[in-house]
Image (spheres, grey):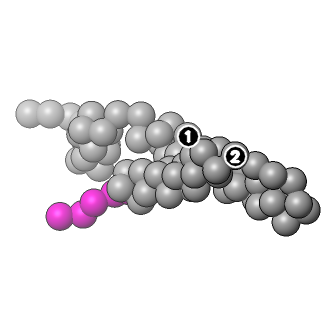
Amino acid sequence: MSKIDPELKKKLLKESQSPFKGLRRILWIAFSGSAFLGLLIMLSRIASGTELQQNNLLIQVGACVIFPTLLILDRDKTY
């Protein structure tokens, strides 16, 4: 029989099913923070009267929606 601790075996099985999950979550958090900071800077420029291209603002809003959504979808799902 296997001499591996059942807890360790469970942890290794979970890691093999979704490798690099921790790294992906760190990246989604970093990208989300960057998107929200960029949006804040763009909104402050708009408030100061600087004209911005609408495409740039839409890209920033899209990033603010997509990256947190990916973070939520990547969380643990308990069945």
Q: Residue at x 41, y 34 (%)?
A: 20
Name the spot of residue 59 as percent of width and height, x first.
Answer: 57, 46
| Separation (CA) of disc 1 from disc 2 | 27 Å
Q: Would you name the residue on which mark 2 appears?
A: 53
Please tell me the numbered disc located at residue 27. Answer: 1
Name the spot of residue 42 as percent of width and height, x first.
Answer: 77, 54
Number of on-image labels:
2
Q: Residue at x 35, y 34 (%)?
A: 19
Pick the front one: 35 or 49: 49
Task: Tell me the kind of residue under disc 1.
Answer: Leu
Q: CB under 8 Å between callouts 1 and 2? A: no
Nearest to viewer (mark 1 / mark 2): 2
Instruction: Give the magenta range.
Output: 75-79
Secondary-structure class at tag 1: helix
Local crowd size for mark 1, using a 10 Å CA cut-off: few (<14), some (14–19), many (≥20): some
Quadrant, the C terminus: bottom left
Pick the front one: 44 or 46: 46
Quadrant, the N terminus: top left
